[in-house]
Image: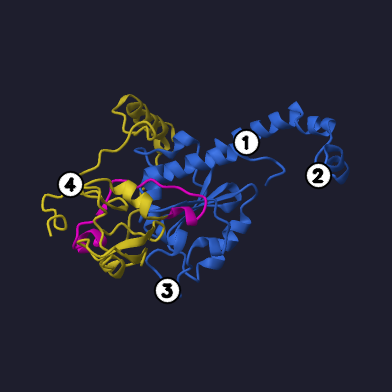
Amino acid sequence: MQVRRHQITWWERIYIPAIVRALAITLRHLFGRKVTMQYPEERWQFPEYFRGFPGLVRDQMDRVKCVACYLCEWVCPPKAIHIEAGELPAGSNVEKEPRVFEIDMLRCINCGYCEEVCPEQAIFMTKEFEFVAPTRGELVFGKEKLLEMGGVISDPIMKWANK
Amino acid sequence: MTRADLLRAGRINAPEEDEAKRAVFTSRLEKLVNWGRKNSLWPMPLGTACCAIELMATVGPRYDMARFGAEALRFSPRQSDVMIVAGTIAKKMAPVAKRIYDQMPNPKWVIAMGACASSGGMFRSYPTVQGVDEIVPVDLYVPGCPPRPEALLLALMSLQKRIEMETFSGR
């Protein structure tokens, strides 16, 4: 099969009409709708389902909801979560609490499995996603930082309060 | 030790020496050069995986990295200042990444973008480099899988702040 090549005409060869057409497009965008988000001042509106980085939550009685069951550590695909359980004194309703709860944010892939697997609804995907650090150690978040990120979620059931 | 002893031992500088170090000219030149450097950071996109898509979005009109003077993505390391490692670095890619870093002219900076480049991410396995800092010195780590363009812009802004602090002798 013979392909007919398009012969470039003199009008096309001087390129000026093409440049004028391109500049017309540029000019149109100059007066059109502005699409650029002025980032540090202007921020994106999150949809409800947005997953940032995980954080631990407290209930309305200021109790850390996590009971150190290790399910999130087990399910975490990049193994970003590190938990060390500590025993609570006898007489309390729960046996264990996390003594160390660390999430390596550089490993975290925002998959949300930890939130999904948590039987105590103690870990949630927060809306926070902007972290920058000059060292890797600074992005391994400990329990305090994670609790600060998670905040308080009031629990209507109060599973451990009335037992 | 008294001040005179310290001076003799060379631990502190004489007042006139200090004065010379604080001389107006060098300090101003440093500031001017740093201002020029921080406002014309040309990135070298080492996009090896999905983070590169977010990198493209950052350069695009919506997030517009050009507002920070970093719109000219140079695919030649010879013309770039900051290497943005966006994506998984496999063992086979590691020598290439190292060579690209070596080919960049000084001064140069590295941003490790995303989980894979920063720490290996979910690829905890032998064919993946567990963090690009095993092969090149990294200035800033950006977590996320992939990080949103805002996070990368934040990294760029903090890199600019760091460049402002730099001195000629400190590099």
* Residue B13 picture quarter: top right
Q: Which residue is mark 3?
A: B125
Classify residue A147 as left or right of residue B158. Answer: left
Instruction: Report the residue marked by disc 1.
Output: B34
Label disc, if present, on residue A154 of the rendered structure: 4
**Whether marks 4 and 1 lie on the same chain:** no
Disc 3 crowd, CA 10 A, few/some/many (<14, 14-19, 20+): few
SS category of the residue bearing label 3: loop
| Earlier residue among tags 2 and 3 | 2
Q: Is residue B26 left or right of residue B115?
A: right
Label 1 vs label 2, nearer the camera:
2
Q: Residue furthest bottom?
A: B126
Q: CA distance from mark 3 to mark 4?
A: 40 Å
Chain containing mark 3: B
Marks 3 and 1 close (CB-CB < 8 Å) = no
- Chain letter corresponding to the colour yellow: A
Q: Residue at x 16, y 58 (%)?
A: A160
Q: Colour of chain B?
A: blue
Start-end of magenta stretch: A113-140
Instruction: Name the residue at 30% across, 56% down.
Output: A110
Which residue occupies the foreground of this view, B130 or B59? Answer: B130
Q: Secondary structure at mark 4?
A: loop
